Amino acid sequence: MKFESLKGFRDFYPDEQSARRQVFDTVSDTARAYGFDEVAAPSLEPLELYEVKSGEEIVNETYSFEDKGGRHVTMTPELTPSLVRMYVAREQEMSKPVRWFALPKLWRYEQPQSGRLREFYQPNFDIFGADGVEADAEIIATADAVLSNLGLENEYELRVSHRGVVHGVVGSLDVKDKQATAVHRIVDKSERLDENEIRERLEEIGLNDGDTEAVVSLTRIDGWNSVGDVLELTDEEGTHEAVERLGALDAALEEYGVETVFDPSIVRGMDYYTGVVFECFDTEGDLRAIFGGGRYDTLVKEFGGPSTPAVGFGIGDATLELLMKQANVWPDEETTVDYYVAVIGDVRPTATRVAEYLRKEGNEVEIDVTGRGFSGQLEHADSVGAAETVIVGERDLEKNELTVKDMETGEQEQVPLEEYVD
Amino acid sequence: MKFESLKGFRDFYPDEQSARRQVFDTVSDTARAYGFDEVAAPSLEPLELYEVKSGEEIVNETYSFEDKGGRHVTMTPELTPSLVRMYVAREQEMSKPVRWFALPKLWRYEQPQSGRLREFYQPNFDIFGADGVEADAEIIATADAVLSNLGLENEYELRVSHRGVVHGVVGSLDVKDKQATAVHRIVDKSERLDENEIRERLEEIGLNDGDTEAVVSLTRIDGWNSVGDVLELTDEEGTHEAVERLGALDAALEEYGVETVFDPSIVRGMDYYTGVVFECFDTEGDLRAIFGGGRYDTLVKEFGGPSTPAVGFGIGDATLELLMKQANVWPDEETTVDYYVAVIGDVRPTATRVAEYLRKEGNEVEIDVTGRGFSGQLEHADSVGAAETVIVGERDLEKNELTVKDMETGEQEQVPLEEYVD
């Protein structure tokens, strides 16, 4: 009987995995360049870990079940709760700030579609224990470095806001809690709506004319030059602080050479964000938001730790792949080996020694294990992407020689056996 | 509220993860040296994938559940079924033999104990499409290379047998199917039993005296010199072939410089093994079997593919770690950065440029994001394992200089700023 994988889950064959491995290596190298240390968390956690702050949407979209011991468990849908749990468990013995990155697989029970899968990788970066704008800037600069090290240039844009902006403006409206949540949601989606649609939706939820215009004005603000305009819509102190913080962030990011755009419609779905939030947008195609992150200063405390500021982001691999392919910077999907050792005739002991020697010298080497004919071996060498084929044959060996074939040019030369054995 | 991870699941903090990453890198490098290409499979598969051949034990010990769409799914307890599924799906377009390795996380609902966890990593190596002893030898040589590249020498022993040995001897006994299974199990466990215990158990399941002695004789055989003794216990043709194959394997492995031991008690639990089987034993401590593998020539066909020989092995990370620690070759558990950039006074723009320059030059760099005092920064630099601290201070900058402190010797020197910025 034949089997299929589950919908929304991917099989990675060698060619594709080779490209993906290159991407993950670049992500890891960038993380280390920015002083992040790798950590890893379980793929299964108690369900309660997600009931605190992840938001209902996440809990409803998880692979949650009861294990054989009756525990309610969840396949990790996001990494932050696990990281915060880990941070709380050992925070006393760690010198702050702590910079962690991880490369987890995550799972969500969602309707699979382009860029959204039920199983995905999500490189994660977090700084715990630094509340300043310097840490916000460092996190956003790291996100930018990941993208530019992957070869992306103008194909993306980092859009930045602060929860205090939308909170302040919505807080100044004459609305009830439920309406406020709905306004947040409309602001969050406003980038995809035109002004009339925004106005209609706000009226639908019962906003008065003045409040409707205030929110529409907010969504009209775009770019660092107009960040001060937010203050015309509210005099909440939190918004003043947010605007000041955003100004400092813009200045700090300039020192990194990182350009960002102020966009008050950046809200981020997660309930736990408290300050600066950002999203990476596709500027050339229609992928829209690729990933995002932000500051979450209350989560550590809510998880039983001491009050600890934190800021981070995670990049889902599926949308990243779409963005990179669109920009033609996805690595070539191909596998190679340095040498294929062809075994022609009764020469296997010598051929084995040659393969082992080349391996010890640091090469990637495949040796024939089939005993098939010469042309079959050469064809296979070609199909596995061998750069060179070392042909170990009976007649050559009588002269203590091997034949080395350059698989690209097709050129062959005789070489002394002693150069290819220990 | 505070949360804990699930029993049998591990959190990896930076120090430990750094060691683990080095181990996995060595495993991957060795895989590539032997011509294996990396693949990756889903972590969740349809339950039915494990109902074919994995054996009841595995199916009972899995994290299996019904997903929100009513599908019976299982968190992958072993990789082989997924690999065979993947192989069958694309075998027509692949040049054989196919060499695959993978570094999956796997899950089993077992009682956690030393070296046995509910979540573990298991590097996996397989060759599909080669039926000869050359492929058996190549797989065992790869396993040996992994261990020796990890720094292990005499602390392990590879013990080898062939399913045809125990099948033939048991097939020659006067026993029913159920007894035969029980005999297999006793042989499998015989390494941990003395001769009287073996004899007792065989009598318990109802073997006659002659058969009991035959099985006891089998378990007494040990080492390549006595492999021929197996033929005194049975004249089954399969056993003759097995003994011949084992002789050829021993000879082939000699060419690799890989020493193994013939041990007829090596049976391997998995139902799907068909030929050569091997296990790695701890020779110095009491860890016993560390991992194993073998030939499974019927699984591809049972999964709906064309008849295809295959041979492979997987190494669980938990026992490997115990073995390496016992042998004092587990990597140092510590993290480092190349540079810590200390920011003293109103110099952040310059400090940022210094950090960014060093990062672009390929270094791992942490920069202060707290604005705390000099001694606090230096202490942190020390605790993150910085090799050097670049001190960016107001007074130095007036002279266009920086101070670089070697964190090991404590020596400091003034350097021109221009050497540390673009």
Image: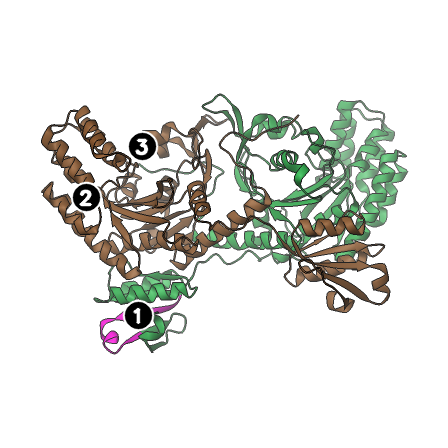
Chain colours: A brown, B green
Instruction: Tell which of B22 and B92 is nearer to you.
Output: B92
Task: Choose between B84 and B15: the one closer to the eye.
Answer: B84
At horizontal 77% and vertical 63% (from top left) the residue drawn is A403
Distance of label 1 from label 3 (alpha carbons): 43 Å
Q: Is residue A58 magenta?
A: no
Q: Quadrant of the C terminus of chain A?
A: bottom right
Q: In which quarter of the image is residue A387?
A: bottom right
Q: Using the rendered image of the protein, determine whether residue A422 is visible from the camera's viewpoint.
A: no
Query: Which chain is home to disc 1?
Result: B
Q: Position of residue A52 (x, y in %)?
A: 31, 33
Location of residue B385 with respect to B96 vertically, above or below: below
Look at mark 1 in the image and give the residue it sits on.
B391
- Provide the chain ID for the residue under circle 3: A
- Mark 2 → mark 3, Cα distance in angstroms: 28 Å
- Mark 1 residue crowding within 10 angstroms, few (<14) / some (14–19) / many (20+): many
Say which residue appears at 33% left-offset and 55% top-offset. A141
Q: Tell me the element at label 2.
A: loop
Quarter of the image containing the N terminus of chain A? Answer: top right
Q: Which of A284 and A379 is in front in this view?
A: A284
Q: Residue A55 carries which label?
A: 3
Whether discs 2 and 3 lie on one chain: the answer is yes
* Residue A281 spot, x, y in % from top left: 34, 44
Do marks 1 and 3 both belong to one polypeptide chain? no
Range of magenta residues: B387-402
The Cα atoms of the two marked residues, 1 and 2, are separated by: 40 Å
Q: Which residue appears at 64% of the width and 49% of the height? A: B36
Horizontally, residue B208 falls left or right of residue A131, namely right
Please tell me the numbered disc located at residue A221: 2
